[in-house]
Structures are given as structure tokens and as C-alpha cells.
Amino acid sequence: MGNSSNLKKNRIFFSRTYRHFAPESRKQWFFLLVFVLPCMAIFLFFFTELTFTLSYWVKASLSSLFPAGSISVSYRRFLPYFGGVWFVKLPNKLPTGEETAINLIATLAAIFLILFAFRRKKGGTPLSIYAVMILLLHLISCIFFLFAKEFFPYTVSEYSELYILQQVGLWLSFIFLAGIMSGVFGYGKFGGKLILFVGIMAYSFVFGCVRYLTFLFILSKASSLYMTSLFFSLGPMFDFIYFVFLYSIFINSRIEHFSSGEGLADWQWM
Amino acid sequence: MKLYFVFVVIVMVVYAVRHAIFSYNRIFDRQRMYHNDIVDSKMPKVTVLIPMHNEEQVLTGVLDALLECNYDRDLLEIIPINDHSSDRTAEMLDEYHSRFPCIRPLHRQSKERGKPAALNDAMKIAEGEIIIVFDADYRPGKDMIRQLALAFQDPEVGAVMGRVIPYNTSKNGLTRLLNLERSGGYQSDQQARYNLRTLPQYGGTVGGFRKSIMLETGGFDPRVLAEDTELTYRLYLSGWKVIYANSAECYEEVPETWSVRAGQVRRWARGHNSVMFRYFFKFLFSRNLSRREKLDGTLLLTVYFVPVLFSLALLDSLALFLLGEMNVFVGLWAVIFLGAYNSYGNFAPFYEIATALMIDGVKKDALLMPLITFNFYFYLWNITLGFIDALADAVSGRRVNWNKTKRFRKAHSGEEKKL
């Protein structure tokens, strides 16, 4: 009998129907104002140096592949009060007619294969539709180069310049978005939110730099023919995929936490 | 072209903000409870309608579950609507009728086919004032009828919607992804709309409505595929409310193959957009609605139109790129564009899904969230096709044919026993 009280449930936890967390707007504002906002300010004051370092790293990495003096680093103005950006200038390479024709045929064949040959088994899945969309973009690029090569609006250097400008914009918007996701929709303690925020931004910086190097290598060694498909398939869209991936890992750990032990006590009713 | 691009970005951002508000409200704010704790001895007579077309594999599940419901049997009538079935559906329903008189099958062989026409015919013979609709593959819990019927003790309520949860989640990747969508759509989205007194939507099944309203306003329109959306807007325009019962959980089978899912999404898009053509301006200028209801209702009404705008914006951005206009301005907008798009996703953005999974305590499946990005291309394609269908319907005035979503469950399978 003495142990009967131990058999009773000390607490009945809430069902999923109407449970929620207590509002924590103070903590959220604290995270945004004390951590995210200063990070944004630091980035705005130092992105010029960041692009300078990135550009010289890319130049050093690619210099052995090109004749001496054909690669350089250049500067252009960007945001008033905050400074400009540095970017790499490279020799341009346009595709030959033969190369374009081979690409055109190969792309058409790939589209045909996905749309028809694989239709019964895999046709209509998200990945096949995505693949067809990218292939269609490449097809349009091939047609453009086949009939109007001289009108293609970008050289590799111009693309490099636009890439850096867009990447700076991407980093800036990611500081904001990662701040909101970790500060507002990142549930739990400050430390966890901080890890999520720093993790997303660290990945973003590394990914942005490696992608810059890869793009410039492909475009200057292969040809500008691949610029369109690279921009649309591995451009900013890809950043959001790893963003959501890192957030999903974080959320999964939070679900584990709030579904058992101490975490269950954090839920409120109604 | 740049202006169009910027316009679409703004539309996407509006949706992203809308869903962020819903997510925040659902996880941090006070929740508005449904009426399920009310005890009332004077419950209304209820008629449960179950449209069926070749449902021999699943019909025993729904009928057996309904027979086990705790609703007073004298106040319960079940009408399975056998709509031109060519399998053993009719025979099995008659067998049920011989054993349980409260089950009164309606066998339809008339020219007019499809769910709306079937519901119209069944309403004419229904004895209950409250109509509750289930699909044939659904599994209502014991208390489900009582919970849904309780809503109508409130004289302002015209319809009620319960929560739908997939039961074949563990089947494959698609069913897991659909579970994420359903979770975000009901646990976060519908509940938040109910909390915020905007527009919870009647979803066509696991829900009910007052028969008198439907009969007075001419019943369901057989030319509309999205009869649920049409009913929602018809009710709001007439001054009625739709309420959401998060506690009324019912289990459904979700498509297990992409081709079936594609057909379902295309049909929904076709139906929803035809409702949009019909109600957009009426809704915008209605005097029976608050500004908040109008704003949210308009965004809900155009939800299957936005992917079409997005498709055009993708083509637009390609043209801008090839014209050399991918300058800083457009580049930065592209970032916002893609960000908003990723947020908007397939109607329940990743943070709304994350909120729902957190509340539901669904472990591991959260890791599938990045795949939703690719999923949206699939929706983009099929919704655009659905929009073109709706447009062609409106222009040509052609007759719309109803195609039932394929079922996957085998009768009396192990999966059934687990439930």
C-alpha cells in the first residue's frame, strides 16, 4: 500500500489537439536584437573584405589552369555607405557549333527518355519533372547558342560579377531568414537556436564559395552554354534546400525533446 | 516583364507571411477550442452520406466503424450512395441493409454521375437535418458523429470540418510526404484559421452541413468538381460560419503512387479554380464578411491560381536572364522570389509543417521536409494543367466528368486490423 502513490501518474500530459507553447516574445526579440541584428551589421561592414578573400582564393585555385595573366580580380561599387564587392575576371569561352549541336541532341534524347521511355515506371515524379525542367532550360540555351550566339548577354566575367552581387544579397537575406527561423520558429533554449543560426550561415558561406569556384571552372573550361542551366538548377534554389535540410535536422531533435521527459512539461493547454 | 516578376514576388511574400502568422498563432497563442466538451441530450437526427463507386475493397471498413459509433442509433441514418458501381458494391450494401436497417443504400444509375450529383440525390431522401459526409476509405472513430453533430447546436454554424489523418503513412516516401502536408494543413493551418476567426474550410469529407441550407440554395452544382470549396464560399456569402474540429480526427487513405496523386491534384486544381472564377468578385464585395475573412478568404480562393502565376514567373525570369536583364535588382528579387516560393511550397510551407509536426510529436519524418521543394515542381505542373482544364471548362461550358481517386487498400488487410 505504501507504494500505491508511486503507481499513480504524477502528471497527465496534454494531447496534441490543442497543446501549444507559452508565448516567448521577450526571448525571441532578445535573440533577434542582440544576436541577429549585430550579425547583419557586421556582415554589412565586412562583406567587401569577404568577397576580397573569396576572389583571391578562387583566383589562386584556378590560376594553374589558365595562362598567366588571364585571371584577375576586379572591384565594383555596390551598396552605398557599406562598400563594393570584389570578383574574379576570367577569359570567356563560347561553345562551338558542333558542341552546341551535340548538347542539343543529347538534351533532346534525355528529355525523350524521361518523358516517354520511363513514363510507365517513373514518369511524373517530382524528380523527373524537375529534371525535365532543367533539361528544357538547357535545351533553350542550346537553341539560343545555335542561332544567336553573338547575342548571348553575359561573358564569364560578367556572370562572375553578377554571381558575387547575388551571393552577397543571398547571405544578407539568409541572416534575416535564419534569424527568424531560429529565433522565432526554433523552439527550445538559446543555445540550440544559436547552433541552428550559426550552422545555416556557416554552411551558406562555405557552399557559396565552393559554388563560385565550381561555376567559374565549368563556365571557363567547358563553355557559357551551361550558364543558364547552372544558374537555374544550382543557383539560389539550392541554398533553400540545405537551409530547410538543416532546419529539419534541428526540428527533428526538438520534436524528440518535447515528446519525452522534461520536454513534455513545457506544453500548455488551450 | 520586371514588373510582373516583382508582382509575383509580392504575392509569394504575402502567402509566406500569412503562413508564418498561422504557424506562430498555432504554436504560441491561445487555442480556440471546439465544442466537443458540451453535453447535450437533445442531439439532432444525423444522416451520414458515403459516396461510393466500386468500393468493394474498402466499404466494410467505413460501415463497420460507423456502426460502432456511440451516437444514438434512433438518430442515425447511414446512406451509402452506390454511384454506378460495376463491382460487388451494390450487393454488399444490400447485405448490410438486411442486417442493419439504419443503413439505407441508394443505388444510382442515372445519367448524372459524380459526387455532387450523388449527394444531391441522397439529400432528397435523407431524414436527418444534419448531413455528415465520409469518403468510403475513411475510418471514423467512435465519438466522431457526436463530435461533428455538436457543432450545429450553435445556430450560426452552417458547416463543420474535422481533422483528416492518413493511415497508410508508412507505405512509401509519397505517403510520408502527404502526411507532412496533411499535418501542416490541419494541425496548423485549419486550427489557426479557426483561432483567428478567418475562414476554416469545409473539406468535403469528415465534415457536415445543414441540409436545409443546401436544399434552399439549390444543392450541389454537378458541374463543380470542388463541391467542398464551393460550399464553404456559398455558406460564408450567406452569412453562415464554418468551424473546425481539430479533436474530431478521422483516418483516410492517401495516394500511394505519383500518378494517382497527380490526377488528384489536377482535379482539385480544376475544381478550386472553377470556384474561384465563380466567387472571386462576389466574395470580395460581400457585405456578410469581415475584412479579415475577406482577406484570408481571397487568399484561400486563389491558392490554386498562384502556382500558375509562379509558372509564368519562371518563364519570365528565364526570358529576363536571356535578355541580359539578370542584373542586381532582378538578382536580389530572385532570392526573395525563391525564398518565398520555398516558404509557400505546396500550400503548407516548411515552417508550418514543422510547427504541426512539433505539436503532433511526429519524429523522424521531419527530415523529409527538404524534399517538399522538389514536390512543388510536381504540383506546379499538375496545378497548371488543372487551371487550364478549369479555364477550358469556363470558356467552352463543357461538362465536367468526375474521376474517383484510386484506392490501394485490400479488403481486410493486415493494415486494417492494426487500426
Image (tube, coloured by chain):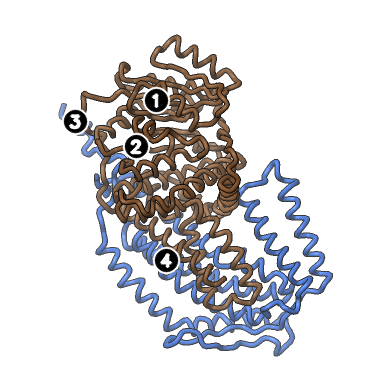
Q: Residues within 10 Å of mark 2 (few under 14, many from 20)?
A: many
The chain holding disc 1 is: B
In what element is the residue under mark 2? Answer: strand
Residue tagged 4: A177
Callouts 2 and 4 in the same chain: no
Q: Residues within 10 Å of mark 1 (few under 14, many from 20)?
A: many
Q: Tell me the kind of residue under disc 1.
A: Val
In what element is the residue under mark 1? Answer: strand
> Which numbered circle lies on residue A3?
3
Residue tagged 2: B159
What is the CA distance from the residue labelled 3 to the residue labelled 4?
A: 52 Å
Which sits earlier in the primary sequence, circle 1 or circle 2? 1
What is the CA distance from the residue labelled 1 to the residue labelled 2?
A: 14 Å
What is the CA distance from the residue labelled 1 to the residue labelled 4?
A: 47 Å
Q: Quadrant of residue A108?
A: bottom right
Numbered disc in front, either 2 or 3: 2
Viewer-nearest residue: B89 or A8: B89
Q: Which chain is blue?
A: A
Residue shown at the point (55%, 63%) measured from the top left: A237
Callouts 1 and 2 in the same chain: yes
Q: How many marks?
A: 4
What is the CA distance from the residue labelled 1 to the residue labelled 3?
A: 50 Å
The chain holding disc 2 is: B
The chain holding disc 4 is: A
Viewer-nearest residue: B62 or A179: B62
Residue at the far top in the pictured view: B98
Q: Looking at the rendering, in which quadrant would you find the N terminus of chain B?
A: bottom right
